Image: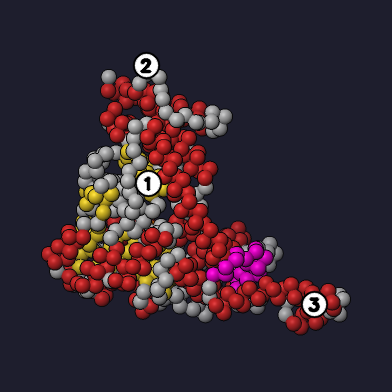
């Protein structure tokens, strides 16, 4: 209600009460005004009523929600199903306000859509908030960013396609190996030839081979190289690339540098590497996933960089309009968390990393295994599976199945020597980021939102699985281990899992006898 409406209301209800109500509304509006004026994430998260008021005000500005709208075009924001309409933001069951027009115009995903002033405002304010959060997370000198409704792989493709126009001769992308398919395919889909640089083993860690990168640049000729495509967040024992040194090579040879920071916003170390790389050398863009860093559904990424004009070029490269859903999800999330809420999540993640690391160390030692020493990886950990590997070549994958049947998701077992062909390229030792890692291992990660209960349950279930495998190994002897597994928990899961374990364990016992 506006001033006139409140004045009219004073004729019906005591003016003192109306004024009080008006003040209450003003406090919500004050938060909205601050947001629009500053374009920064509020320190304290908003309550849902302020959020709904804000979204309501935005939605009402879009032409599909105009009371007297008469659409005669081919894209008028019509939606057949009210369920679909509700999915696209509508909190009022009678008057359905929706964000239907999406974001962008045919020529630029960041452009204002004349039919949808509210969605356009939503898009601009979301990008501004995300920029603020990227700074808060450690990349203080980032110049621009935008949310794109595609996951990380496709967003990397968009960056490579933008560079194509600047470097018409280039057909290679130099890529320190990381065994993850979407980032590899991002280069193939963009039409480039990935030049894979094998990692070097330093202690337990797999690290960037800088000499090999530089030698490859010289061999191919800098003009023939589209960019160096490096990675921060990755599975241990690989660790984030040596970003500063790669950025210096890029600056020296005048080659662009695109960083895959898929789930690195949640780690101050990954963000620091990007900041330092840009300070001492060259980073053109860095790409991060929305779901993995901000706890929203899959479907969006953020493309960010230090040169405003280049980031705008990438947004202009996107052909056509786009879904507003990922932008709306991240906007609601950041406004409800506030910067303090997000910082708290980052802090808790770091604490969980230490906790997970300690628990894995204890458990692995109880089974004569070892937590790999990977101090440069701030998110992922790896535990050797040497005893399993020595016992039977299928025991490592068997452990993976056992964890899966116990509903443990996210942990991955990496056996030795698996071959995998991705888009015509064959990788030896696939998943381990190198041809011949010295041993098989198991990965687990401490990602944003993880709770102590998740770690405890994982450790209990892993303990149980290792114990079962050990039991088969030493059928006649007593089984040791750290069996703190609470049998009253997960009784149903455990019964099913045990049946499956027996089938699988017997299969490979039969095969080896
Ligand atoms: C290094 C790396 N790059 C990219 C991705 C994800 O790509 P997308 O968001 O396209 O699925 C992941 C997924 O975990 C990853 O680990």
Location of the C terminus by quadrant is top left
Residue 467 appears in view: yes
Q: Residue furthest top?
A: 476
Q: Earlier in the sequence, mark 3 or mark 1?
A: 3
For label 2, the crowd category at 10 Å Cα-Cα, with few meaning under 14, some 14 to 19 and many 20 or more, is: few
Residue underneath mark 2: 476
Q: Decide if ligand 1 comes within 8 Å of the CB at mark 3.
A: no
| Residue for point 41% across, 45% down | 357
Q: Which residue matches tag 1?
A: 381
**Residue at horizontal 32 percent and vertical 64 percent from the top:** 259
Q: Position of residue 470 (x, y in %)?
A: 37, 26
Q: For mark 3, what is the residue?
A: 19
Whichever of callouts 1 and 2 sits on the residue coming sooner in the sequence is 1
Q: Is residue 97 visible?
A: no
Q: Position of residue 40 (x, y in %)?
A: 53, 73
- Looking at the rendered image, the quarter that the N terminus falls into is bottom right
Q: How is the image coloured?
A: secondary structure
Quote the CA–CA distance across marks 3 and 2. 82 Å
Q: Position of residue 299 (x, y in %)?
A: 45, 59
Q: Secondary structure at mark 3?
A: helix
**Mark found first going from the N terminus, 3 or 2:** 3
Q: Where 505 falls versus 28 (above or below)? A: above
Q: What residue range appears in magenta?
A: 41-62
Describe the element under mark 1 as helix, strand or loop: strand
């Amino acid at each position: 209600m506006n001033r006139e409406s409140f004045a009219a209301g004073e004729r019906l209800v005591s003016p003192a009460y109306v004024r009080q109500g008006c003040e209450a509304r003003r406090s919500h509006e004050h938060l909205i005004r601050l947001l629009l004026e500053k374009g920064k994430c509020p320190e304290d998260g908003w309550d849902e009523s302020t959020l709904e008021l804000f979204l309501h005000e935005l939605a009402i500005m879009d032409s599909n929600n105009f009371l007297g709208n008469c659409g005669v075009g081919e894209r008028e924001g019509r939606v057949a199903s009210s369920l679909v309409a509700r999915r696209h933001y509508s909190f009022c069951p009678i008057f359905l306000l929706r964000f239907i027009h999406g974001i962008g115009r045919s020529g630029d995903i960041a452009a204002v859509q004349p039919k949808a002033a509210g969605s356009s405002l939503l898009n601009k304010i979301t990008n501004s908030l995300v920029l603020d959060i990227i700074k808060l997370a450690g990349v203080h000198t980032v110049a621009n960013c935008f949310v794109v409704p595609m996951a990380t792989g496709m967003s990397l493709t968009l960056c490579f396609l933008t560079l194509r126009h600047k470097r018409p001769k280039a057909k290679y992308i130099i890529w320190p190996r990381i065994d993850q398919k979407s980032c590899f395919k991002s280069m193939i889909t963009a039409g480039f030839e990935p030049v894979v640089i094998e990692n070097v083993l330093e202690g337990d860690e797999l690290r960037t081979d800088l000499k090999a990168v530089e030698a490859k640049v010289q061999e191919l000729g800098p003009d023939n190289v589209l960019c160096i495509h490096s990675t921060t967040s990755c599975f241990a024992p690989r660790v984030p690339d040596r970003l500063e040194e790669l950025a210096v090579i890029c600056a020296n040879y005048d080659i662009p540098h695109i960083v895959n920071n898929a789930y690195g916003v949640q780690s101050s170390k990954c963000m620091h590497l990007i900041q330092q790389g840009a300070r001492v050398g060259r980073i053109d863009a860095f790409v991060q996933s929305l779901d993995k860093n901000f706890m929203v559904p899959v479907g969006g990424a953020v493309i960010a960089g230090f040169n405003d004009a280049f980031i705008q070029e990438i947004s202009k490269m996107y052909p056509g309009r786009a879904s507003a859903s990922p932008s709306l999800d991240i906007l609601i999330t950041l406004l409800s968390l506030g910067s303090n809420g997000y910082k708290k999540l980052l802090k808790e993640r770091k604490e969980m990393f230490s906790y997970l690391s300690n628990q894995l160390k204890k458990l692995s030692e109880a089974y004569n295994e070892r937590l790999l020493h990977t101090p440069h990886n701030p998110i992922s950990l790896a535990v050797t599976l040497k005893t399993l590997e020595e016992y039977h070549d299928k025991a490592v994958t068997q452990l993976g199945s056992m964890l899966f049947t116990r509903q443990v998701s996210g942990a991955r077992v990496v056996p030795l020597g698996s071959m995998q062909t991705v888009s015509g390229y064959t990788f030896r030792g696939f998943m381990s980021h190198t041809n011949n890692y010295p041993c098989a291992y198991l990965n687990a990660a401490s990602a944003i939102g993880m709770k102590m209960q998740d770690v405890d349950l994982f450790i209990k279930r892993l303990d149980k699985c290792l114990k079962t495998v050990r039991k088969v190994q030493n059928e006649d002897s007593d089984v040791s281990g750290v069996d703190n597994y609470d049998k009253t928990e997960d009784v149903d899961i455990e019964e099913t899992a045990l049946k499956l374990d027996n089938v699988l364990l017997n299969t490979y016992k039969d095969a080896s006898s």
